[in-house]
């Protein structure tokens, strides 16, 4: 799970650096203010992927805990 989050962070970093290199030196109508709106869909997509990965991880942790409780209760009886 840590590797997935690390790779996710690396992709975000590469996107931000690429955006900064491409947009910041550009004057005029293609300046940072007008092209910054291109990051909104990227942020939504990246956020939804992160939320999905986090939800899957939390569900696995919950399932593991419930399985341990169930296994403990069945061994005690």
Image (cartoon, helix red, strand yellow):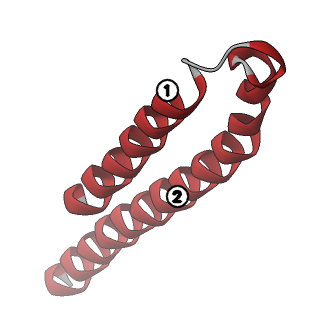
Outermost residue on the front side: it is 27
Q: Is residue 73 left or right of residue 39?
A: left
Name which residue lies at 47% across and 34% down.
Answer: 16
Name which residue lies at 32% across and 53% down.
Answer: 5
The percent coordinates of residue 11 (x first, y second) are 39, 51
Instruction: Name the residue tied to disc 2.
Output: 55
**Neighbours of disc 1 within 10 Å: few (<14), some (14-19), many (20+):** few
Outermost residue on the left side: it is 75
Mark closer to the observer (1, 2): 1
Q: Is residue 27 above or below residue 41?
A: above
**Neighbours of disc 2 within 10 Å: few (<14), some (14-19), many (20+):** few
Quadrant in which residue 29 is drawn: top right
Give the mark nearest the N terminus, 1 or 2: 1
Instruction: Name the residue tied to disc 1.
Output: 20
Q: Is residue 32 left or right of residue 51?
A: right
The percent coordinates of residue 51 (x first, y second) are 57, 51
Instruction: Check if mark 1's residue and mark 2's residue have beta carbons within 8 Å.
Output: no
Per the model, the C-alpha gap separating discs 1 and 2 is 31 Å
């Amino acid at each position: 799970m840590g590797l997935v989050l690390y790779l996710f962070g690396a992709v975000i970093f590469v996107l931000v650096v690429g955006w900064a290199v491409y947009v910041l030196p550009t004057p005029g109508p293609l300046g940072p203010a007008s092209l910054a709106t291109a990051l909104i869909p990227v942020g939504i997509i990246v956020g939804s992927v992160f939320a999905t990965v986090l939800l899957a991880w939390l569900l696995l942790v919950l399932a593991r805990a419930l399985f341990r409780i169930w296994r403990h209760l069945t061994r005690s009886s």
